[in-house]
Image: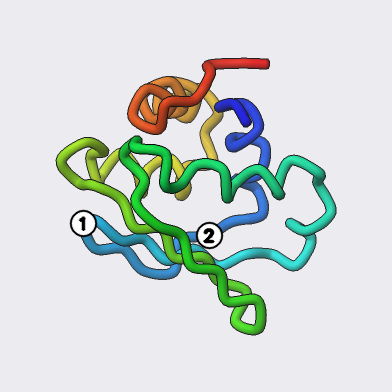
Amino acid sequence: MNVDDIAELRRFITVAHHVPGRIRLKLNPAVRHPPKAAGLASLFGNGNGAVRARLNILARSLVLEYDPGRIDPGRMEEFFASDDADPTADLARELSAAFGLTPQA
């Protein structure tokens, strides 16, 4: 999974609640259709800034726990909440470094 994949999936995600170190995302039911959505689980538990993910299928929510010392909480929320593509591209590059992702396909 690369940054472009995550940026593409953002259109299915809204921020429901956020405190430093934990962000709850609401998922549009259509998120299950893009094949790239399955790769989200690969971001967690590999020694990067992401600590854990909890998916609640019935509530259509995803809770991401992350290290706020490695990933700026404001930037994390801005990435998921912004509709503007230009700043999102910069945020995607920044988060890719924190998550250990490749910058593009």
Colour scheme in use: rainbow
The residue where tag 1 is placed is 20
**Residue 98, position as x, y percentages in the image:** 33, 29
Residue 28 against residue 97 in the figure, above or below? below
Image quarter hosting the C terminus: top right
**Disc 2 versus disc 1: distance between alpha carbons?**
17 Å
Mark 2 residue type:
Thr
**In this picture, residue 67 sits left or right of residue 27:** left
| Mark 2 or mark 1, earlier in chain | 2
**Residue 64, position as x, y percentages in the image:** 41, 58
> Circle 1: is it few (<14), some (14-19), or many (20+) Cα within 10 Å?
some
**Residue 93, position as x, y percentages in the image:** 43, 20
Residue 49 against residue 51 in the figure, above or below? above
- Residue found at x 70% / y 48%: 37
**Residue 10, position as x, y percentages in the image:** 60, 45
Outermost residue, bottom side: 58
Outermost residue, left side: 69
State yes or no: discs 2 and 1 in contact (Cβ < 8 Å).
no
Image quarter hosting the N terminus: top right
Outermost residue, front side: 46
- Residue found at x 24% / y 56%: 21
**In this picture, residue 47 sits left or right of residue 21:** right
**Number of marks:** 2
Of tags 2 and 1, the one toward the viewer is: 1
Q: Nearer the viewer, residue 6 or 40?
A: 40
- Residue found at x 62% / y 64%: 27
Q: SS for tag 1?
A: loop
> Circle 2: is it few (<14), some (14-19), or many (20+) Cα within 10 Å?
some
Mark 1 residue type:
Pro
- Residue found at x 78% / y 58%: 32
Q: SS for tag 2?
A: strand
Question: Which of the numbered marks, if any, corresponds to residue 14?
Answer: 2
